Amino acid sequence: MLTNRKFYIAGFIVSLFLAGVVSFYASSSPDGLEKVAGDIGFIETAKDHTNADGTLADYGVKGIENERTSVGVAGIIGVIGTAVVAGVGFKLIARKPKRDVN
Amino acid sequence: MHIPDGFIDVQTSAVFAGLAAAGVAVSLKGARNQLDEKTAPLAGLTAVFIFAVQMLNFPVVAGTSGHLLGGALAAVLVGPWAATLALTVVLLMQGFLFADGGLTAIGLNVFNMGVLGVWAGYGIFLILRKVLPKNKSSISLAAAIGGLLSVPAAAIGFTIQYAMGATATFSVSAVLSAMVGTHVLIGIGEALITGLTVSAVLASRSDLVYGWKNNVQKLEIRSAD
């Protein structure tokens, strides 16, 4: 059994490593839905994303030329951002009031 | 599996945005009852891990890739309500920050991956947990099979949305068979990642795992009679 601290640090580091390093090696083939949409023909109906020109669009940081660095930094930003939003969100959800008024 | 803007018309997208919002509201209530200070951090870590692993597209057949959806994984680790919330956070981050999944399609995507994928995976997990021997390997196996089937379940969700409000006119049955066929294969990857992750968490902190814990608790109650 790992202590709480060790368990969460390990989980977070694994996530950072996957999003920051391993992500570069991910397959760039279309995913299942894209493939089906292309084969059947309705891919044409897709519209550009509202944020298609955003700083982090398509998991790359705008302005970073090196692809490995670009996707890695985008992944790390995503992991930290998700950790903040989900971490704070779940903490608030789990907070039990001391006295139940009802 | 992330639907872009344009595939599904605005009316149908709005219907599913409503359904997804209802799912999130129910999940907030459920998670509030179930999560405590001890389990809340695991729900946060689950969202983080799913975000990271969703970046890792793996090849399935020539020219096609897939990635983890994570609904069954999250449901087994932190319960189905927190799982829906974790997937919703991931999908919102992806849609707003990374331009992955259309903004008008967020309800469609939350419904397919965060509600349908979670509950299909969790339902299958519960059935298998009942019939399999009560040990940790069974929990991992049940989670893996739940993960496997949750992917075609989400693909069927898309097909229903396509049938209701596609902007294209290709036949629904062609979409159904292509979506299910492709996503059963992607489900094999989902099963492997789900099974391995659940067994790693069971090996290090089984006390935190929802799908194992409430199994053990039931056994304890019985033995105390």
Image (spheres, grey):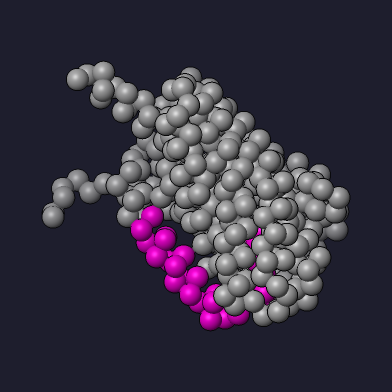
In this orientation, does residue B132 appear? yes
A38 left or right of A82?
Answer: right
Q: Residue at x 73, y 53 (%)?
A: B182
The quadrant of the image that shows the N terminus of chain B is bottom right
Q: Position of residue A68 (x, y in %)?
A: 82, 49
B11 relative to A16, above or below: below
Q: x, y percentage for residue B115?
A: 48, 56
| Residue drawn at 37 percent across, 35 percent down | B38
User: In terms of secondary structure, what is the magenta stretch mainly?
Assistant: helix
Query: Which residues lie in the magenta part?
Result: B1-27
* Furthest-left residue in this view: A102
Residue B213 relative to residue A8: left or right: left
Residue B29 magenta: no
Q: Is residue B172 left or right of residue B108?
A: right
Residue at 48% across, 34% down:
B128
Q: Foreground residue, B44 or B106?
A: B106
Does A56 sit left or right of A7 as displayed?
A: right
Up the image or down, B101 lies above or below B57; here it is: below
Q: Quadrant of the C terminus of chain B?
A: top left
Q: Is residue B9 magenta?
A: yes
The answer to whether A87 is drawn above or below residue B161 in the figure is above
Relative to A8, residue B24 above or below: below
Q: Position of residue B146 (x, y in %)?
A: 54, 41
For the question of whether residue A58 can be seen, the reply is: no
Q: Residue at x 46, y 44 (%)?
A: B123
Number of residue marks: 0
Kindly indicate the quadrant of the structure image that contains residue B165: bottom right
